[in-house]
Amino acid sequence: MVTVSECAWHADADAAMGAVAGKGAGEQSLARELYRRLEDDWLLIADRNFFNWADWCTAADTGAQLLWRVKADLTLLALALLPDGSYSSVRVNPKIRGKARKAVLEAARGGQNLDEDQARYVRVVEYEVPDRDGDGKGEVIALVTTIAAMTAAAAPLLAEAYHRRWEHETGNAQLKTSLRGPGKVLRSKSRTWSARRSTATCSLITPCRP
């Protein structure tokens, strides 16, 4: 199961379910069922496993704002450094290569309007967690967002918002705790239900309403 849940209330707003193995069973595949159902007043926060060109475009085209972490090896071209430490960048469709790609990057450097099938402007926030111990210490966290204006959401606010995605994990933990155990029978006067332990996994995709 992959769910979209609210940060504050831990309420699931939408979900996609599938088989635990086989074609279409992964988190990314199930998440694609949800992107088109996003609402335009949501900020969708997602972990680095979900970022790719096609899914980013699908989610952004709904009108929802996006704040997704990207993998450390992703090359992000800095077009302009902003006063809050974030910078504007551009993501190019990976199908565009060679001279065509260079032309798109030159257009982006010049601030020209881009064909959204070829490339899209984004804003990047990079930071470290200085008091972090153990796994991830010294790691640079890179976030990509559709919120282009620094005045709409400054970099520290976006960094704080990203870490609220862990509230999705908290909500999942609450559910799994109540379903702990190999299975038990719940009885009433009229019917018998069998409650089995959940084996579903939920993704770190979280909308946070402004």
Image: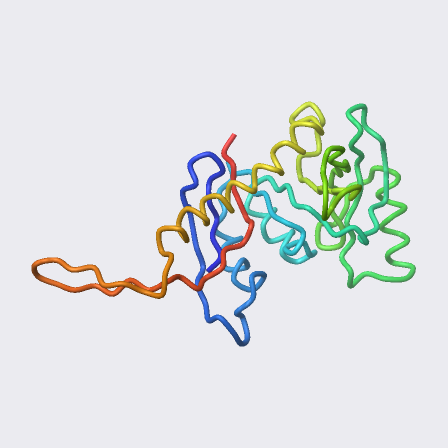
Q: Residue at x 52, y 74 (%)?
A: 21
Q: Residue at x 63, y 31 (%)?
A: 160
User: Looking at the image, which is closer to me, 155 or 129?
Assistant: 129
Q: How is the image coloured?
A: rainbow
Asked if 151 appears above or below 60 in the picture, the reply is above
Residue 164 appears at what percent x and percent y? 57, 37
Q: In the drawing, does residue 29 fall left or right of residue 171?
A: right
User: Looking at the image, which is closer to me, 143 or 53?
Assistant: 143
Residue 36 appears at what percent x and percent y? 51, 53
Q: In the drawing, does residue 118 fall left or right of residue 197?
A: right
| Residue most extreme to the left | 189
| Residue most extreme to the bottom | 22
Asked if 144 appears above or below 201 in the picture, the reply is above
User: Looking at the image, which is closer to me, 117 or 174?
Assistant: 174
Q: In the drawing, does residue 208 fall left or right of residue 110?
A: left
Residue 43 appears at what percent x and percent y? 56, 38
Q: How many marks?
A: 0
Residue 74 appears at what percent x and percent y? 80, 52
User: Looking at the image, which is closer to me, 127 or 198?
Assistant: 198
Q: Residue at x 81, y 54 (%)?
A: 73
